[in-house]
Image (cartoon, helix red, strand yellow):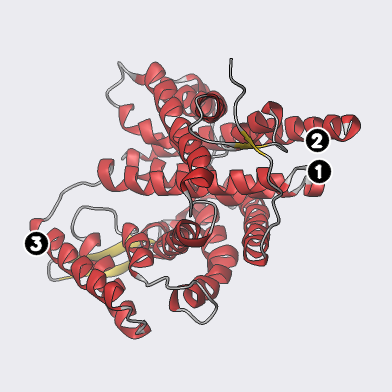
Amino acid sequence: MNQPPKANNTFRLTALFKAFFQSQQSAGILLVVATVLSLVLANSPIAEPYTSFWKTEIGSHLGGFHLKHSLTGWINEALMTIFFLLVGLEIERELYIGELSSRKRAMLPVIAALGGMIFPALVYLLFNYNHPDSISGLGIPTATDIAFAIAIMGLLGDRVPPALKVFLTALAIIDDLGAIVVIGVFYGSGFSALYLTLSLLICGILYILNRRGSENVWLYGILGFSLWFCMLHSGVHATLAGAILAFALPFKSGSPNTLSYQIEHKIQWPVTYLILPLFALSNTAITINADMTHSLLSPESLGIFFGLLLGKPMGIFLFSILSVRWGIASLSSSINKTLLLGAGILGGIGFTMAMFVDNLAFTEAKQIDLGKISILIGSTTAAILGFLLLNAASKRKQKTA
């Protein structure tokens, strides 16, 4: 039998990748702090005013425009659009000059991400195929939280090979792209032909500007806001406007003087230190009661938990191994099967992306909160197991080196 091809290449991380990796580590740590703080406050003597604060209605109804949402709603609908803009710019950079810029380098994380979406969905389906009220949660365990996963791997420092860091980062970025597609295709509702047409028209204008290489930031800003507004009323989730705008910005050489580079670096700080912590605070303001703990054995909860903890690593690991064995992709010689499995387990950290899908998948507050608790338990378990396995594998590899 032919041996699977392994790329015996030395990974030297670029300054741009190191900066991105470090920013995601910071974001992951902040997310953990914000989540713990929010859960403590939501289950303390000030639980009622704290949870009510996030439900405060802001805005008004102007004519036929629905511009009134809870504080949590505005964070999820508006601020997270900027997060998706950053994600889109990261994907664009990887496609042009990063790990996804060539077929050989891109195939492994692409195929791994595909497996990491199919298997969790199948596991969730296994528990919920005969429960129509929870089948809409199929997309929840398919998502990976890039910041949280990178933060856990970052704790291991130089004990894990650079190639594994690149693999996990590329995998999570592709996973985010998959999540964007899932949100756009499966979680829209109440479609408006008028606003869908206007959204497509704006996308067409953005495409023309991209082809002409325009870097007029004000023009992109106006069109980006208009696209968000139209998508907000179209039935397609408004945050997708951020990802569309990202791909509309001309990448060119990707040098520091280009518009896409400048925008990515300007929004990285507010996304990392403001938007994601606010998302975590508002979306984990969950008061845990006896009924909720009993519901943790429900099909919905078990589907999410095992989808993240078993489906994710199984899909990532099996699809990676098979793609290498069949000669479709190559694996760095510094990554053994144990390290690959450890990265797959870290892929089971769904957290923010999974919670985002959870908000769209269900309509009842109790069901949404149960989904979030299941995501937290599954993601935390995956983080601990992934860290322990990677740490043990790294020590073993150092002893045999």
Q: Residue furthest right?
A: 399
Q: Is residue 253 above or below residue 289?
A: below
Q: Given contact means CB atoms under 8 Å apart, are the residues at marks 1 and 2 in contact?
A: yes
Residue at 37 percent of width and 21 percent of height: 125
Residue at 53 percent of width and 65 percent of height: 271
Q: Which residue is mark 3?
A: 194
Of the 4 image quadrants, the one containing the N terminus is top right
Quadrant of the rendered image containing residue 205:
bottom left
Tell me which amino acid carries mark 3. Leu
Q: Which residue is mark 2?
A: 394
Q: CA distance from mark 1 to mark 3?
A: 55 Å
Tell me which amino acid carries mark 2. Ser
Q: Does residue 40 show up?
A: no
**Crowding at mark 1 (Cα within 10 Å: few <14, some 14-19, many 20+):** some
Mark 2 or 3: in front is 2
Q: CA distance from mark 1 to mark 2?
A: 6 Å
Tell me which amino acid carries mark 1. Arg
Q: Is residue 257 left or right of residue 166?
A: left
Q: Which residue is mark 1?
A: 159
Q: Which of marks 2 and 1 precedes in the sequence?
A: 1
Query: Where is residue 144 shown, x and y percent of the image?
Result: 51, 42
Query: Where is residue 168 shown, x and y percent of the image?
Result: 60, 44
